[in-house]
Image (spheres, coloured by chain):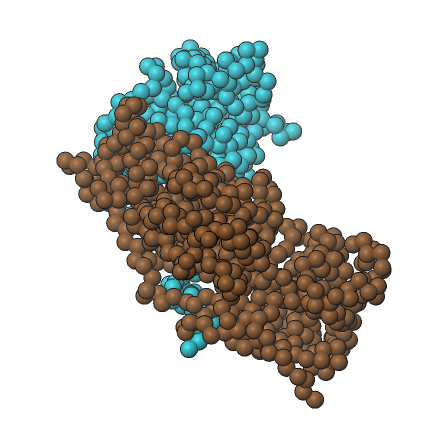
Chain colours: A cyan, B brown
Amino acid sequence: MTIGNGRGNGVAPVKLTAKDFKSDQEVRWCPGCGDYAILSAVQGFMPSLGIPRERIVFVSGIGCSSRFPYYMNTYGMHSIHGRAPAIATGLAVTRRDLSVWVITGDGDALSIGGNHLIHALRRNVNLKILLFNNQIYGLTKGQYSPTSERGKITKSTPMGSLDHPFNPVSVALGAEATFVARSIDSDRGHLTEVLRKAAAHRGTAFVEVYQNCNIFNDGAFDELKEADTRADHQIRLEHGQPIRFGADGEKGVRLTEEARVEIVDVADVGVEGLLVHDEHRKEPSLAFMLSRLAHSTHKPTPIGVFRDVDRPVYDELMAEQLEAAAAKQGRGDLAKLLYGGDTWRLG
Amino acid sequence: MTKPVQVLDRVTIRFAGDSGDGMQLTGDRFTSETAAFGNDLSTLPDFPAEIRAPAGSIAGVSGFQLHFADHDILTPGDAPDVLVAMNPAALRANIGDLPKGATLIVNIDAFTARNLDKVGYAANPLEDGSLGDYAVHGVGLTSMTLEALKGFDISKKEAERAKNMFALGLMSWLYHRPTEATVAFLERKFAARPLIAKANVTAFKAGYNFGETTEVFAVSYEVKPAKLRPGTYRNISGNLALSYGLIAASQLSGLPLFLGAYPITPASDILHELSKHKAFGVRTFQAEDEIAGVGAALGAAFGGSLGVTTSSGPGIALKAETIGLAVSLELPLLVIDIQRSGPSTGMPTKTEQADLLQVMFGRNGEAPVPVVAACTPSDCFHAAVEAARIALKYRTPVVLLSDGYLANGSEPWLLPDVADLPEIPVAFATEPNHDGEFWPYLRDEATLARPWAVPGTPGLEHRIGGLEKADGTGNISYDPDNHDRMVRLRAAKVAGIAADIAPLEVDGQEGARLLVLGWGSTYGPIGAAIRLVRASGGKVAQAHLRHLNPFPANLGEVLRRYDKVLIPEMNLGQLRMLVRSQFLVDAIGLNRVRGLPFKAEELAGAIAGLLDEGVGT
C-alpha cells in the first residue's frame, strides 16, 4: 500500500480519455462560471498522466470550487472549509502510491485555511494544490475575499473593503513552496502546460488559476484574457527566455542595479538587458519580486511557472525513517514491546 | 549495630521540592524500586505548568506522591504519611495535607532567612514549635551531598543538583528498597557524562549510608511484597499504556497507525512515545495545529490507516468540526482526549473529567459519537484497543477519554498475553455492491456500517463529503425524507453498539440499597471508599462505566434496582445529567473540581452520610 513515488506510479501506464474522468453527477456551477473551463482542462489533461483513475484522489474544502471532486470520476473527498491541505497531507503521507490533488479557492485557502496552506507548502508533501482565485466569495453570495482589491464594494463592504489583499503567488513563495505557478481559466493551452509541470513536480505544487466569477465579480481578469488587451497584460514566464511581452515583444522586465525588477521598453535596454527567467533558481527572492510586479490584475501580470526547485519531500523522508527504524530494530514485535520494560514475575 | 525494623502494611510518601529539584525523577525512581520489590502501588505526580517557576516560590513546587502496600490498593493515598520537603516552599505548600503524627523529612540547608521570607514564613517553622504535631527529621541534604562529592571535579552547582539522589538514597534505606536498578539507571542516564553519573551514584549511596548510620532515624520500615495475581508485571503510566494500546490495535487490525497531533499538556507524551515506534510502521505527524492534527488523521483513515488524534479539552474544541465530518463520512477515527481542568486554558497540569458533555454534544447537527473511558493507568491500554475496535467495526469516530491523573499516574500492570488480545478484523470493500456499481452508503444490515473502499481499489471510485448524502448511493441529497432517514440511521448505528459491548457489572452486596456509579479515573477512589464503608459495616454496591455512549444495555435495569444512586464526578454532574435524562433516575451528585482526584475518605464520608440518611432502611 505504500509503494510508488506519490505520483500514482507503481503500476503500468493506462490509456484513458477525458470522458473516463467525468463522473455521473450533473455539474451545478452557474452558467458561464470559469470553473467549467478548469474542470474541462483537468479532465482533458488527466489521461496524459497515464495513472489509473483509482490511484487519483481529489480533496477539496468548501466553496464553489470545492464542488470539483464530485465531478471527477476518481476517488474524492469534499471536506470542510479550509482544511483540505491537512486532510490531503494525512492521505498523501500514508499512501505514497496515490496522486493527490487539492482543489481550493481564495477564501478556502487564504482565509479560513491559510495556516494549513502555508504549512503544506513548507513541508513539501506530495500534493498538487490548485487554487481557483476569483477574488470574491461566491458560495456565500458576494462578500469580498482575501484577494479582493482594497476598496471593493460588496454586500459586506458597502463603503469599500479596508484590507490589503494577498497575492497568492507571493504567499506561496514566501512559504518557500518548491513549485509555484499561475494560469488563467480560459487559456486551456497554458493551463494544461502548467498542470503538466505541476504533476511532474516532486513535492507540493501550487497553482493559482485566475477564475472568472461572472455573477459576483465579472471581468476581474478581462485585461489578461481579451484578445485586444492580453498581449499587453500577460507577462508569460518561460524558463531560460528573456521576460518579454506586448504584441511585438516590445516590453520586457529587467533587474535594476538596486536589485529591483521593473517593466521597461526593449528599445531602451535591448534584449540583452532583460532578465532571463530561471524557474530552477534555488533562492526564491527573484521569483518573489516577479510576483510583486503587478499589484492588480488590471495591470501587466506574470503568468506561468515562477519557481520549480528540488527539495526533500516530506512523505519520502517519513518513509525513509520508517524503513531505517525497521532495519535497525527489526519489525515491531508487540509482545517484546509490552514485556520489554523493567518487569517482575509473581507466583 | 542493626536498627529495629517496623513492619507496615502500607505507606504514602510525598516528595516535594522546587521544579528544578528533580522531584519527578526522584519519585519515578522510588516507584521503580518499589515495583521491583513487589509491592502494589499507585502514584500521583503533581507539578506546575511553568517549566521554571521562580526558584523557591510556592508556585514552583513540584510534588510526587506514591502509595505502596503489601496488598492490592486503588489510589495514590489520601494523605501522605511521610513528606520529604526540599525547601520552605515545599513545606508551606504541602503541610496542610499532612495528618497529625506524620513524618516530615526536611532539607534544613534550604531553610535560610531569604527562602523563608520568600514564602512568607515570619519565623523558621523548624524552630518556632509550629511543627509540634509531626515527627520532624531535619537533615542537611545539600551540605551532606556537597560533602560526599568533595573530591569530584564538578561545579558546586552540579554537585548540589545531586541532592535529590541523596534524598532518594535515604528514603531507599528507610523503606528497604532495592538499589541496584537505580545505580544502573543513573549510569545509563548520564552515560555521556560519566563524572556526573558517578557523582549521582555517590550521592545516592551516601544518602543510603547516612540512613544506616545516623541517629536521626532510630527505626527503618518494611512493607512486604503484595500478594497479587500471578503473572508478569511492569509499572506503567496511563499515557504509556494508551500508546501501547494504539500500537496493539494497529497490530491486531493489520492497519498502519497514523497519529496526527499538536503538542498539548497532558497528552503530548503519547506523541513522544509513538514517535519512537516507527519500526511498527507507526507514522507520527506533528501538525501545525489541532485542526490539522485531526484532519490528517481523517485523511489517513480515508486511505486505510488507523487514524488517531490525541489532545486535551481545548484541542478537542478545535477538532469538533472535523469530528462532525468524520460522522458524516462514516470513516473510523480515534479521538483521544486526555482531560485537564477547564474552562479555557484552565489548569493544564491538573486533572478533571469535565469534557464528557463536550465530546458527547460539542458538534453541530445530530452528530452522535461513541465514547469510551479508561479507569486506571493500565486500563488505558485496554480502553484504547476497545475504542479502536468500535471505530473500525462501525466506521465511526470514537472518543476515548482519559485524564491528567491517569495519564501521569502509574501502577503495576499485569501484562496481558498477546495471544489473548481480541482480534480486530477489518475488511475493505473490493467489489461493486449494487448491480455492478459501488454504493458507498449501502450499509451492513447487522452493524449499519457502510463499506470502506480505500483509494487504489479499481472500480470503486467514489466521492464522499460533508454534504448530506442519499441513503445508499451516497450522492448529494437535499431530500427532506432522506435527511430524516440518514440522521436516524447514523443515530441507530451508534445506539446499536450497545448490543456489542459488555453489560455493566455490579460489585453488589446483599442488602445494599445504594449504588455508587462512576466513570473514568474515579474508579480507584470510589473502590477504596467502598472498601472503607463496607469495613465499617455499610452496605453499598458499586458499578463503573467503560462505555458512556452508548451506555451498556442493562444500565437502566441496574439503576432501577437501587433506591438511590450516587454519582461522584470531577465535574459539576455531567454523567448525572445523562443518566437523569435517559433513565429518569434522580441520581445524586458528588462533585469536586479541585484539579485533584477524590480522596477515598471524603467519598466514604459522603456514602456513609447517605446510608445514615436511611437509604433502604
Which sits in the foreground, B128 or B267? B128
Residue at image point 78% right, 66% down: B132
Horizontally, residue B185 falls left or right of residue B448, namely: right
Which sits in the foreground, B116 or B154? B116
Residue A35 in view here: yes
Check the picture and name the quadrant holding the C terminus of chain A. Answer: bottom left
Which sits in the foreground, A133 or B93? B93
Q: Quadrant of residue B22?
A: bottom right
Vertical placement of residue A143 versus B75, above or below? above
Residue at image point 75% right, 62% down: B87
Residue at image point 53% right, 67% down: B41
Vertical placement of residue B35 versus B58, above or below? below
Vertical placement of residue B36 versus A206, above or below? below
Percent across and percent down for residue B61 are: 69, 56
Q: Quadrant of residue B26?
A: bottom right
Percent across and percent down for residue B483 are: 30, 27
Name, please, the residue furthest toward the left.
Answer: B435
Residue A56 in view here: no
Name, please, the residue furthest toward the front.
Answer: B617
Number of callouts? 0
Percent across and percent down for residue B410 are: 52, 62
Horizontally, residue A120 falls left or right of residue A196, namely: right
Residue at image point 80% right, 58% down: B115
Horizontally, residue B485 falls left or right of residue B110, namely: left
Which sits in the foreground, B366 or B326? B366
